[in-house]
Image (cartoon, helix red, strand yellow):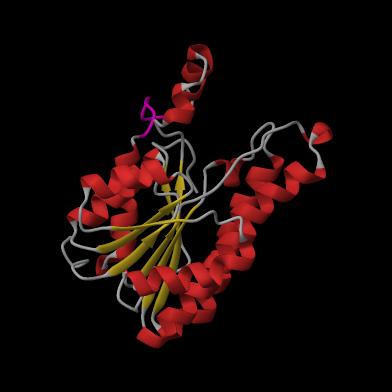
Amino acid sequence: MTDLKSKNIIVTGASGGIGNSIVDRLNQAGANILASGTRIEKLQSLKDKYKNIKILKFNISQSDKIEEFIENATGELGGSLDCLVNNAGVTQDNLAIRMSLTEWQKVIDTNLTSTFLMSKSAIKKMLKNKSGKIVNITSVVGHTGNIGQTNYTASKAGIIAMSKSLAIEYAKKNININCISPGFIKTAMTEKLDDKFKEAIISKIPSARLGEPDDIANAVLFLCSSKSSYINGETLHVNGGMYMA
């Protein structure tokens, strides 16, 4: 897939493990990338590795600055936007009866509301191009639910429904909006899990292993490319068979 050459792509959450892999794959495909995240040292490491990418520190929870961010990021890419990868997100786990309104609101605001606002601002740019793609990263638990994550699961399920509605609204404008739903992926977060808990998770995965960040990056590459031009409003499950829609 080399048809991303000269395509302008914004990737949020690029300073994490999955984000790193997404940037790597898109860079290999020849895309012009603006990598965003909250940890400038991690972004600088990406810049040192991939000299041609642009970086911009930004926290997507700053909802009142999202339109400005998209404007600045698009400017860094030369003034147009072909694809947005909404990969950034947060967790703040707790059992439902102990979960504070602040814990609930922070996750919903960051994961769902900010993803909507990012998409909204990106669509305005894509309408000028008369084409575009948005890839929203959700989660397997947005389909299955999960203990201690009522806020997170609600935000991820909301992204799926929101993406379908946006896809319907802008399909005739040649804008494709899809989701990727990762299962349990090898990241710094999963490495901290207790071995017994990790084994319990793996026992539920038909492929009998955790996924790799590259598994998600490959799916992003596909949905950003012209190979997926007739796919819209869909969720691509990348979970080793743990959940089958």
- Residue 186: where, in percent of width, then height? 39, 30
150 versus 88 height, above or below: above
- When the figure is inspected, residue 160 is found, relative to residue 165, above or below; the finding is above
Residue most extreme to the right: 97
Residue reaching furthest to the top: 196
Which residue corresponds to the image point at 41% horizontal and 77% vertical from the top-left? 175
Q: Is residue 201 left or right of residue 36?
A: right
**What range of the chain is rendered magenta?**
206-211
Of residues 37 and 229, the one drawn nearer to the viewer in this rendering: 37
Give x and y (percent) for residue 38: 49, 48
Left/right of residue 172 with respect to residue 160 in the rendered view: left
Vertical side of 228 occupied by 146: above or below: above
At x 67%, y 34%, the residue is 93
Residue at 53% x, 66% y is: 118
**Left or right: 63 as drawn, with respect to 164:** right
Of helix, strand and loop, which mostly describes the magenta segment? loop
Figure quadrant of residue 7? bottom left
- Taking the magenta stretch, the answer to whether it contains residue 209 is yes
Residue at 38% across / 41% down in the picture? 41
Image height of 103 relative to 130, above or below:
above
Q: Is residue 100 magenta?
A: no
The picture quadrant where one finds residue 129 is bottom left
Quadrant in the picture for residue 2: bottom left
